[in-house]
Amino acid sequence: MYLKGVGEKRSETLEKLDVKTVYDLLRHFPRAYVDFTSPVPIRDAPFNEPCTVRGRVVKKLPPARIRKGLSIFKAVFTDDTADLVIVIYNAEYAFKNLETDREYFLAGRLTGNLLRKEMNSPQIYPADISEPVQPVYRLTEGITQAFLRQSVRNALEIFDRNIYEPLPKEIMRENSLCSLEYAVKNIHFPADSHACGIAKRRLVFDELLTLQLGMLMLKSRSRRRAGCPMKRLDISDFYGSLPFELTAGQRSAIEDCISDMTGDFPMNRLIQGDVGSGKTAVAAGAACFAHKNGFQTALMAPTEILAEQHFETLSGFLEPLGIKVALLTGSMTAKQKKLVKEGIESGVYSVAVGTHALVQKTTGFYKLGLVITDEQHRFGVEQRAMLAGKGDDPHRLVMSATPIPRTLAMMIYGDLDISVLKELPKGRQPVETYAVTGKLRERVYNYVKKYLDEGRQGYIVCPMIEESESELQDVKSYAKKLSEGAFRDYRVGLLHGKMSSAEKERVMGDFKGHMTDLLVSTTVVEVGVDVPNAAVIVIENSDRFGLSQLHQLRGRVGRGSFRSSCILITDNATEEVRKRLKILSGTSDGFRISEEDLKLRGPGDFFGSRQHGLPDLKIADMSQDTDVLRAAQETAKSILQADPGLAEKKHAGLREQVEELFKRKLSDS
């Protein structure tokens, strides 16, 4: 607010960009740059692509007032290889400032044709600009690039008077890093692309090092506590009561859990398995072991329908052994909730399965020893902590069906040990996958009908990038068109994210109970719901999904004993799309697919907008910066080996950065 030129009103607007302090402003890194060091001749400038040209204004044309509130200003611009017309909308001030015969840089997109080239609303800079590479920032309404650039310059002046260096010199030397001063200046106003690269590497290293230090410190903190000590007891009756044989991976994961729970520290483990790899059976084994040691287990799922599914599965595994399982969800009546909560608090129930209702203040436990969370990336770190707070440092188990490359898993779940389930349980059907263009849509519908006529069920999934009204309308009208047209003889259901939880539960319940044959859905259907009778899935506009998401969606079928198919429809058959869909058609190994997905799309798309409850990263890209990530991991380990609490004076800056990133004091629990 007190930074020159900002003031109270703009300060409030900047908060929408997560900029509250001068420090935040310096960490509001450019998303791109306009580079004036190598302009192209107008004659060679490409159409409809960002480019920079240099030339002079030769003539300013009379303004045209099109209608009330819209004025268009034009000027003829040349570099002697060719001419173009600058078109400026409603910005009379900018137009007046243009001087004929003066040289300027223009940055924008060329439109028109070879005979008449235009550049609409270009960024215009005098040719004698002192900073030849200009940053381009993420904006919000009421904030312009020019204002942000000037504000950053003013912030850099403050930084100049208060320079600090959080990294000890030996770390900078070992990793060939520039100073923070150089990095901050050259990320915003680099002399050239080389300087920008050096600056970026330093800032990426800082961010990943800070994240690693924080994660490792969280991990070591949980390591310092005794938790709920358990003794090694025999659970062969659990193995014997199962109606199928566990895979080697499942047995090994249960053994990992038992070793952790009988150790000196609380378990903090991630069970990472592909769609349908049998993670719930591992959870049941761990819950059985906790029960035998006199402890309760809580399993939290992100939706009611998933909670119900886990409840049914765990009841089937555990009730025959006399282990009572309870279900607690938000949609139960007050009376039902009261009875269940009393049973959990008195210890009648050894296992409580539920949604967020489990973390509410009114839910108490008799002796909570194991906390299991499903689909980890749908819960923040806070919710995990709240549930764990219900017991005296219980053991923690996290289940994730998103196969993640190991480097990335180490980063995201830095505070967890990892068990991986690779093979599928016996009897699971491989899903045949085909990619086709929209021209074959009628044939695809006929193919789906064959499955429905055999008594099977199917999904048709439509992407929604953002759940806007128009896209929602598309899904609704598409479902209507199918139910009145190609699938009028079948029962068609509709599921989308704008429905209330109760509506979603009802639709999925109808589908699970085979009261609908075909479910038209957005991607809300992607997570974990088990309908063994569903044997065919069609994914429209499949080019708009990441590979990992397509793989998750494909996992909705093939869960029973029936031959199953996945059909990917796309009208955008570019080389890249073909390559991606070929990878998916060629393998059902989620880990391999996730590696490829990460190479192609980067982690932003890989996880959707939220990164698994992690602090937001401003500049690091965990798929592109893997070499820096490894260096940061090694450095973090060696720093904490020598100074576990970052208490030494030389680590004060790093400690401050960790606290800033995790938004809490390291002395807090």
Image: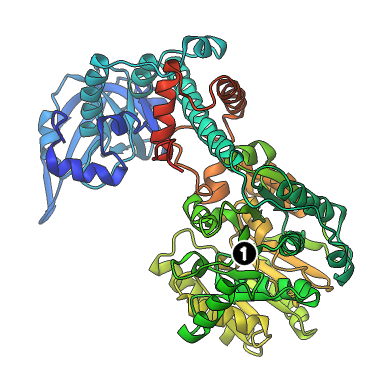
Residue at the limit of the structure toward the bottom, as seen here: 489
In the depicted structure, whether residue 112 falls above or below residue 158: below
**Quarter residue 216 falls in:** top right
**617 left or right of 563 in image:** left
Residue 83 in picture, x, y percent from top left? 29, 28
Asked whether residue 524 is in view, the answer is yes
Between residues 509 and 565, which one lies in front from this camera angle? Answer: 509
Task: Check disc 1 and give the amino acid type.
Answer: Leu
Q: Residues within 10 Å of mark 1 (few under 14, many from 20)?
A: many
Between residues 83 and 638, which one lies in front from this camera angle? Answer: 638
Residue 301 in picture, x, y percent from top left? 58, 65
The residue singled out by tag 1 in the image is: 299
**595 left or right of 617 in image:** right
Task: Work out which quarter of the rendered image holds the N terminus and state it.
Answer: top left
| Secondary structure of the residue carrying numbered label 1 | strand
Residue 452 in picture, x, y percent from top left? 74, 82
Residue 71 in picture, x, y percent from top left? 13, 47
Residue at image location 38% in from the left, 34% down from the top: 660
**Quarter residue 650 falls in:** top left
Residue at image location 46% in from the left, 18% down from the top: 648
**Quarter residue 42 falls in:** top left
Asked whether residue 130 is in view, the answer is no
Residue at image location 33% in from the left, 28% down from the top: 135
Residue at image location 48% in from the left, 58% down from the top: 465
**509 left or right of 125 in image:** right
Between residues 388 and 500, which one lies in front from this camera angle? Answer: 388
Q: How many labels were placed on the picture? A: 1
In the depicted structure, whether residue 629 falls above or below residue 250: above
In the depicted structure, whether residue 315 falls above or below residue 59: below
Colouring used for the render: rainbow
In the depicted structure, whether residue 232 falls above or below residue 238: above
